Amino acid sequence: MTKDEQTEGIDQNGQQESPLRDIPVTDGEEVPLQQQLETATAQAEDNRNQYLRSVADLENFRRRSIREREELRQFAMSNLMEELLPILDNLGLGIASARTQTDSNAVADGVTMVLDQFKGVLSRNGLVEINPQPGDAFDPHQHESMAHQPSDDLPPEVVSQVIRVGYALNGRILRAASVVLSSGPAAPGADSK
């Protein structure tokens, strides 16, 4: 042990230095240890209470968020359902009319009107129909190829027929359109079998 290490903690008078030398002094006197302890204990208790309040607030926020999310999930579709009710009414009227109507064209016209009303409601709520036309380029993000078919009128790898219409909701594909792609003109002699 060096001489500096031996004298560390000893003041100029040879007395052991107090580890509390940084304690505030009032009117030339040190603050009593008991008072310091009481102050520190009070501060610790205050900190603990603040922590417990913060934890409780966070738990309340979590519960409220879960409750609000559940309510939103339950009632988010209420506006859409309200818009669909007249369509249900019109379908009921159409069925009643079809049972008494002898003109099938009038029934078909009524069903077409209800279908257009239904598509309008869905469209206003973000549903977009994916219905490519023959000759449109194949888009693997929106179309699903079901088969290839020779075509003298269409170049290879374009839509030649739509089997099932697709739909997207607010930009997200719900169902891709099922299509048949053109494989170009038929090879000579392919029909001879």
Image: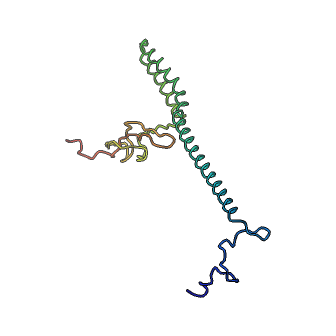
Is 79 drawn above or below residue 17 in the view shown? above
Q: Position of residue 107 (x, y in %)?
A: 44, 18
Q: Position of residue 30 (x, y in %)?
A: 73, 69
Is 93 drawn above or below residue 30 in the view shown? above
In what quadrant of the picture does the N terminus appear? bottom right
Task: Name the outermost residue toward the right.
Answer: 27
In what quadrant of the picture does the C terminus appear? top left
Task: Name the residue nearer the viewer: 159 or 76.
Answer: 76
Task: Name the outermost residue toward the left.
Answer: 193
Task: Name the residue nearer the viewer: 82 or 139.
Answer: 82
Task: Name the residue nearer the viewer: 40 or 173.
Answer: 40
Quadrant housing residue 97: top left
Q: In the image, what residue occupies the spot 37% across and 40% down?
A: 179
Q: In the image, what residue occupies the spot 37% across and 38% down?
A: 161
Q: Position of residue 117 (x, y in %)?
A: 51, 27
Left or right of residue 37: residue 73: left
What color scheme is it? rainbow
Q: Position of residue 49 (x, y in %)?
A: 63, 51
Task: Name the outermost residue toward the bottom.
Answer: 3
Left or right of residue 40: residue 107: left
Number of numbered discs overlaid on the protein picture: 0
Q: In the image, what residue occupies the spot 45% across and 15% down?
A: 96
